[in-house]
Each structure stands twice: as structure tokens, then as C-alpha cells.
Amino acid sequence: MTRSELIAGLAEDNPHLTVAEVERIVSALFDEMTAALARGERVELRGFGAFTVKSRQARAGRNPRTGETVQVAQKSVPFFKAGKELRERINKPAPAPAKGKKNGGAET
């Protein structure tokens, strides 16, 4: 799902809001989450998951094109850990297929 698909879906589910209003809400949410992560804070959405920032140490890397060794600087990277409810919903068993004819009605 892209950002524009998210905005379109939310606007469709909330007809009392215009697409422009939904876009401002989504932008404000993402901006605040980004700002909190930039400050080193944790962003937790109960039932969905938590975003944190992890630090990666400087290391020696390799340029895949030339094979040359290069130094990779220390950096901070965002990290997401899915919440229990999200993991359970994703891993929910699929409903059993209906009994009857298969392959568009062709007998097998």
C-alpha cells in the first residue's frame, strides 16, 4: 500500500472528510512520528507495533561493483517491531475452501 492509496482508502471510509483533509492528517501523523524518532523517542501504536531508532556501528564495507573496501560511517536506522495483535492477525489461519466443484466448475 502506498501513501496515496492509504489516503484514498481513509477518505473513502470517512466521507465527511475531504481528500485534502485526510492528506493533512496523514502528513501530520507521519511528521510527528518522524520528529519523535529523530529525537530518539520510541513511537508505540498499541495493537500495531513500535518504532525505535537503533544505532549501527561504523564498519568496513565492500563496494559490490569494484570489490574495493570502503569505510561505512556509524548511522542511526529506524526499526519496527510488530505488536502481538498485528502478528496474530497476520498469522490467522486462512478460511477453509468451500467444498464443491473446483477449477471454475470443471470436474477433477
Image: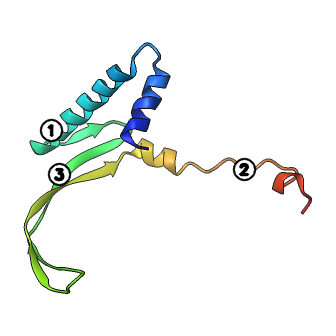
Q: Which of marks 1 and 3 is nearer the N terminus?
A: 1
Q: In this view, does 91 lie to the left or right of 41?
A: right
Q: Earlier in the sequence, mark 2 or mark 3?
A: 3
Q: Is residue 73 left or right of residue 13?
A: left
Of labels 2 and 3, the one closer to you: 3
* Residue type for callout 1: Ala
Q: Name the residue under label 3.
A: 53
Query: Residue 51: x, y in percent?
Result: 25, 46
Considering the image in quadrants, where does the N terminus appear? top left
Give SS at disc 3: strand
Residue visible at 43% across and 42% down in the picture: 85
Residue visible at 44% across and 49% down in the picture: 87
Give the alpha-carbon distance from disc 1 to disc 3, as whole Å.
Answer: 10 Å
Considering the image in quadrants, where does the C terminus appear? bottom right
Relative vertical location of residue 84 with respect to residue 58 in this rendering, above or below: above
The image quarter in which residue 48 lies: top left
Q: Which of 29 and 42 is in front in this view?
A: 29
* Residue type for callout 2: Ala
Residue visible at 24% across and 81% down in the picture: 64
Q: Which of 89 and 106 is in front in this view?
A: 106
Q: Name the residue under label 2.
A: 96
Query: Residue 62: x, y in percent?
Result: 18, 81
* Residue type for callout 3: Val
Relative vertical location of residue 49 with respect to residue 75 in this rendering, above or below: above
Q: Name the residue under label 1.
A: 36
Q: Which mark is residue 95?
A: none
Q: Which of marks 2 and 1 is nearer the N terminus?
A: 1
Q: Mark 3, residues whose alpha carbon is within 10 Å: few (<14), some, or many (≥20)?
A: some
Q: Mark 2, residues whose alpha carbon is within 10 Å: few (<14), some, or many (≥20)?
A: few
